[in-house]
Every structure is written in C-alpha cells, then in structure tokens.
Image (spheres, rainbow, N blue to C red):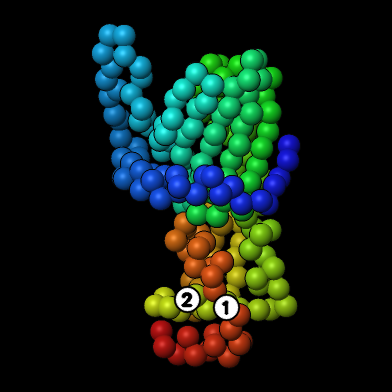
C-alpha cells in the first residue's frame, strides 16, 4: 500500500464529468434499476451499487468507476496486467490524496466482484481514505486556528471530526455556532481555499445567526 500526494494532472479532465454523473445518479439511491442488455452487447455502462457506483470505462485492461464515500466523490481505476490488478483511488474534488494497492487477482475477477474490491483488498479502504483527507486538512486548524470560507459563502469553520460508530463513514465539519455538517466535494474545495480567521470572528458569526 502506498499513499501518494502527487497531483494526477492527467485525471483532471475527468473530474467535472465524474462529479456530474455521481450527482445525477445519487438521487436514485435505494431504488431498483433494471439493467437492459441486447444479445451480444456489453453490460450497461451505468449500474447501481451500495455506493452509487457509476461505471466510467469498461475495457479489457482497464475498469474505471466513480463512487461515493460519505458525501465525497471518489474515482477508482483498476488496471489489469496478466493476473495482477492495480487499484488506484483519489478524491475527485481533491486528487492530491491518492491511494494505490495491488491485487494478485485478474481484472475480470475484480469486475465480477467490484462491490467488494471498491472497499479495498482488506475492506478498510474507506477508513484509509477518510483518515488521509482528515490528516491533509488537520494542519489548517492547528493552534486553535479557525477558517473563513471564500466569498460569497464566508462561513467560519471551527473544526472537524471523523464520524462513524462501528467504522468510519464520513467527516463532519463544525460551522461557527456549533452546527455540524458533512464534508462534501464543494465544501472540501472551499476549505482548501479558505483563509485563517481571528478567533473573535466566531463571536461575530454567532451574533449574526
């Protein structure tokens, strides 16, 4: 397992499309969708799973899907090489957080059991990805620093926490006034672009509310 913090520029062109597709299909969560296929044709390029998975590419040596992790969009790329599959994962809204693992399993088998492999080889990929983005954002809130989101939002963010009982499911962000909201793609980008704010800004924000 390797965590890499290098930006994959070649993936940037897929981010807008990925976010659009996942947003569109997330409204279908919890409903059944019939998959239609004609004789001799390939499986429908879009299918629902427990993580709102959307298939972006299905080729002999490459399988790409976009899924959700909590409220965040995650891009998965499975690359087949003989009887080995390389799994690469990054956050669509912040590809700097990148994870890679290798399976001694052919790509065809990964496709058949994609729900399981989306969770990582040992089933802990969700926790690893959430922990990685949490560590990436933590320095922004060091030394009791609060953050002001860029305009026109300009809310004050006072901290964050990993959420989940039996296993990590999401990251929650604390907004001035004591409100906790889930970390979304849009909010993640805003936090990355936020600026440090003085502590008295919290009182000002609470008075406004």
Q: Quadrant of residue 53?
A: top left
Q: Pointer 1 and pointer 2: residues touching (CB < 8 Å)?
A: yes
Residue at 59% from the left image edge and 47% from the top image edge: 8
Task: In the rendered view, tell whether residue 167 sits above or below residue 81.
Answer: below
Question: Is residue 106 or residue 36 the one in the foreground?
Answer: 106
Q: Secondary structure at mark 2?
A: loop
Residue at 47% from the left image edge and 56% from the top image edge: 185
Residue at 44% from the left image edge and 25% from the top image edge: 58
Question: Is residue 172 or residue 7 the one in the foreground?
Answer: 7
| Left or right: where 123 falls relative to 156 | right
Residue at 38% from the left image edge and 46% from the top image edge: 17
- Say which quadrant the N terminus sits in: top right
Tell me which label, 1 or 2, sits earlier in the chain: 2
Report crowding for label 2: few under 14, some 14 to 19, many 20 or more residues within 10 A (C-alpha): some
Q: Residue furthest top?
A: 39
x%, y% of residue 150?
47, 76
Residue with the mark numbered 2: 150
x%, y% of residue 167?
61, 44
| Left or right: where 36 falls relative to 74 | left
Residue with the mark numbered 1: 195
- Is residue 26 visible from the viewing direction of this image? no
Per the rendering, the mark at residue 75 is none
Question: Is residue 61 or residue 138 the one in the foreground?
Answer: 61
- The number of discs equals 2
- Is residue 78 visible from the viewing direction of this image? yes
- Say which quadrant the C terminus sits in: bottom left
Q: Secondary structure at mark 1?
A: strand
Cα distance between the residues tagged 1 and 2: 7 Å
Task: In the rendered view, tell whether residue 179 sits above or below residue 183.
Answer: below
Report crowding for label 1: few under 14, some 14 to 19, many 20 or more residues within 10 A (C-alpha): some
| Left or right: where 67 falls relative to 110 | left
Q: Residue furthest front?
A: 10
């Amino acid at each position: 397992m390797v965590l890499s913090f290098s930006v994959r520029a070649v993936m940037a062109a897929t981010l807008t499309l990925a976010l659009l597709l996942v947003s569109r299909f997330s409204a279908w969560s919890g409903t059944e969708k019939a998959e239609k296929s004609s004789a001799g044709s390939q499986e429908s390029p879009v299918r629902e799973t427990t993580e709102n998975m959307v298939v972006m590419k299905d080729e002999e040596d490459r399988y790409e899907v976009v899924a959700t992790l909590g409220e965040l969009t995650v891009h998965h790329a499975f690359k087949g090489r003989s009887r080995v599959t390389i799994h690469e994962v990054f956050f669509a809204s912040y590809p700097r957080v990148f994870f890679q693992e290798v399976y001694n399993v052919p790509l065809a088998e990964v496709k058949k059991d994609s729900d399981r492999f989306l969770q990582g080889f040992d089933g802990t990929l969700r926790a690893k990805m959430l922990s990685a983005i949490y560590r990436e954002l933590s320095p922004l809130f060091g030394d009791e620093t609060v953050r002001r989101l860029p305009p026109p939002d300009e809310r004050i963010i006072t901290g964050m926490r990993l959420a989940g009982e039996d296993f990590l499911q999401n990251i929650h962000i604390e907004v001035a006034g004591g409100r906790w909201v889930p970390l979304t793609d849009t909010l993640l980008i805003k936090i990355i672009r936020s600026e440090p704010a003085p502590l008295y800004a919290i009182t000002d924000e609470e008075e406004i509310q």
